[in-house]
Image (cartoon, rainbow, N blue to C red):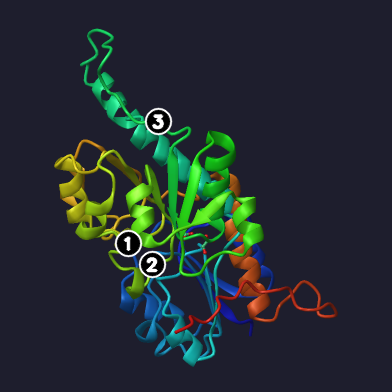
Amino acid sequence: DRPRVWVSQPLFDDIVGRLHEHFEVDATGKVTVWSSPQIAAKLRGCEGAVVTLNERVGAHEIADATSLRAIANVGVGYNNLDVAALGARRIVATNTPDVLTETTADMAFALLMAASRRVTEGERWLREGQWTQWAFDSLLGNDIHGSTLGILGMGRIGQGVAMRGAQGFRMRVLYHNRSRLPDGIESNCRARYVDFATLLAESDHLVLVLPYSPATHHVIDAAALARMKPTATLINIGRGGLVDEDALADALSGGRLFSAGLDVFEGEPVVNPKLLAVRNVVLTPHVGSATRATRRAMATLAVDNLIAALGHGPDAGSPPTPITAIKTAKR
Ligand code: GLV
Ligand code: GLV
């Protein structure tokens, strides 16, 4: 009997098809909202699964999945996985870093430019028929070139954002991170390490691109927002829970923050109604990595990871394909 694997959402048929060479595949044909008991039922009897950020996989979901050996997450962020619970059961967890770095860094700039130059606000105004005459002093925004770019979370994506800012827009780049980067990487992306308070105070545009965990929950709260320039732009391409959305909506509507661009939301796909009611925020539906090429690369890497983790590499004589395993969280 061939081992069984579950694929939680539609990816690309030709890529998922490669799993059929090794496994009995239970693939999902259309976008599906899975409850925790449904996930548990799907995992029962499986040796592996490919899941997305929609599917929470923790102690509860794996309790009855006694043959489960690997979970391949399609995405770089893995706060949907309880890696401690998986690790305790010796279940390998993998993610898809690197392949989405440049595409996601592009999206940070799309939001940054849209929010600071009021692109979507202007478009709404035009479509509403309000453009009756070109007006010298309407829809004024803030410059991107030559301004100060702040990056909170300096992983691969953060470094990609820094490069774009420094090289493309001659921005001064500041960053804050759990640990300081080696000098070589700092000078390569022309970024200077500062403490969190300095980052908040000096950034004209602040990009959040750090992993979400209990330690980073609401890292941008009312107190942090109060330290930012009233002319600043806040961009979130990490996870919604990094930001206190009620406090952000208040700062935006009260004129204490110029604008924001958000690709991720705490209760997504439900968006905080206070944010929906605010004029000066650009909202996109978690599409940071959503280009055709990158989504194909992510699906390919996740499928490769699952095949390698379950020991079905391309040919038995060669060394096993490296697995993009998630490093166990340090405490
Ligand atoms: C998407 O948000 C990802 O983490 O890849
Ligand atoms: C996150 O880990 C990243 O790749 O930036």
In this rendering, the answer to whether 201 lies above or below 183 is above
Whether pointer 3 and pointer 2 mark residues with C-beta atoms closer than 8 Å, the reply is no
Q: CA distance from mark 1 to mark 2?
A: 6 Å
Residue lying furthest right in this view? Answer: 317
Residue behind mark 3: 143
Residue behind mark 2: 212
- Asked whether, in this view, residue 125 is left or right of residue 54, the answer is left
Q: CA distance from mark 1 to mark 3?
A: 25 Å
Q: CA distance from mark 3 to mark 2?
A: 29 Å
- Asked whether, in this view, residue 18 is left or right of residue 318, the answer is left
Q: Nearer the viewer, mark 3 or mark 2?
A: 3
Label 3: state its secondary structure.
Answer: loop
In the rendered structure, which amino acid carries the disc numbered 2? Answer: Tyr
Residue nearer the viewer, 17 or 226 = 226
Q: Residue at x 74, y 75 (%)?
A: 313
Whether pointer 1 and pointer 2 mark residues with C-beta atoms closer than 8 Å, the reply is yes
Label 2: state its secondary structure.
Answer: loop
Q: Nearer the viewer, mark 1 or mark 3?
A: 3
In the rendered structure, which amino acid carries the disc numbered 3? Answer: Asp
In the rendered structure, which amino acid carries the disc numbered 1? Answer: Leu
- Residue 241 drawn at (x, y percent): 30, 63
Instruction: Identify the mark nearer the N-term, 3 or 2.
Output: 3
Residue nearer the viewer, 204 or 287 = 204
